[in-house]
Image (cartoon, rainbow, N blue to C red):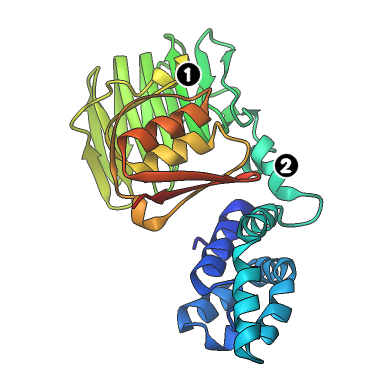
Amino acid sequence: MNAAGAGRDAVAEAAIDWMLRLGPMADVADAPPAFAAWLAADRRHAAAWMRLQAATAPFAQVRRLATRSPEGARAARETLLRPRRRVLRGLAGLCVLGAGGGFVADRASPWRGWTADLQTATAQRRSWTLDDGSVLTLDARSAVNLDGGGRRLHLRQGCLLLQAVPGNPPSWRVAGGHARLDVGAGRCLLLRADGHDRVALFEGDAVLDAAGARIALRPGDAFDADARGTHRLAHGAAGMADWIDGRLAVLDAPLAEVVDRLRSYRHGLLRLAPDAAALRVQGVFPLDDSGRALAALAETLPLQVRRFGPVTVIERGH
């Protein structure tokens, strides 16, 4: 679980994961040490768990019934089996954490971008013509700050595509969390993901500055950069800008990465089971119809996709 910067949806997902792992009738006193550590790590964790407990309060009475007699145990079992789907829908509703429905607001317009100079909402792509004639396009749920006088962009979250024109100063400085690009006239991409940045150059010239190294890029080059260094992507920049046309092109990527991209185009909560995260994916998927994209994934991978109200759960199939 990330520290204070984690979004409310991540806290909700973790709480739901613990509830599903421990069971709605679990006693906290019997929970593993890892759960106690998670609960104590952040006050938001405890608040999320309390909301889940409130939603499953009816199970406390069922649990007491189950311990009184064999007949009570049978009745409790039937009671638990019948409303399972309703209970999970209730858990899904608890993803609205914080006062004023913060989760709902964040899914529509990411809270990290509220103070950014330029931003996009969930399932929205948008382009701007900048003062020098360069064109900046943001993918869904992206946010950028501009340095008005210095041809500088700071990507706070999401993904950007810059079509840069010659100017003064002669290059744009495009910065993410770990990577910085000095871009002359040309077309480049910067994606800010969890723990790393991804850069690509489609045309023109650019220099990647990351982890103390400077790398001159050629058209078609693509790199990942994190705190440890840089890694050249074998498939290069192919397909990385297809989101401009509403497509997600995937060349042998983990399912977790694909789901992260689909989250930007889905207003509800998309929860991926840990044992499915490493499945490898290849194909082209529609971003503007995430339901169809999920159906295509379920057809080609051993997956089960279930929806409970605003929450969609992706699990390994049997």
Q: Position of residue 140 (x, y in %)?
A: 55, 28
Amino acid beneath label 2? Ala
Q: Label 1's element? A: loop
Could you give the CA–CA distance between mark 1 and mark 2, rounded to whole angstroms? 23 Å
Tag of residue 216 = none
Q: In the rendered view, does 141 fall on the left or right side of 261?
A: right
Q: Residue furthest front?
A: 71
- Asked if residue 149 is positioned above or below residue 203 in the image, the reply reads below
- In this figure, which residue is indicated by the disc labeled 1? 246
Can you see residue 156?
no
Q: Position of residue 77 (x, y in %)?
A: 59, 74
Residue nearer the viewer, 154 or 201: 201
Q: Residue furthest bottom?
A: 68
Tag of residue 105 = 2
- Asked which quadrant contains residue 47, the reply is bottom right
Q: Position of residue 103 (x, y in %)?
A: 69, 48
- Asked if residue 203 is positioned above or below residue 43 in the image, the reply reads above
- Residue at 46% x, 17% y is 244
Can you see residue 167?
yes
Could you classify mark 1 by the number of other residues whose Cα lies within 10 Å: few (under 14), some (14-19), or many (20 or more)?
some
- Residue at 51% x, 30% y is 290
- Residue at 65% x, 40% y is 107
Q: In the rendered view, does 233 fall on the left or right side of 226?
A: left
Q: Label 2's element? A: helix
Could you classify mark 2 by the number of other residues whose Cα lies within 10 Å: few (under 14), some (14-19), or many (20 or more)?
few
Q: Position of residue 135 (x, y in %)?
A: 51, 12
- Asked if residue 141 is positioned above or below residue 203 in the image, the reply reads below
Amino acid beneath label 1? Gly
Residue nearer the viewer, 28 or 138: 28
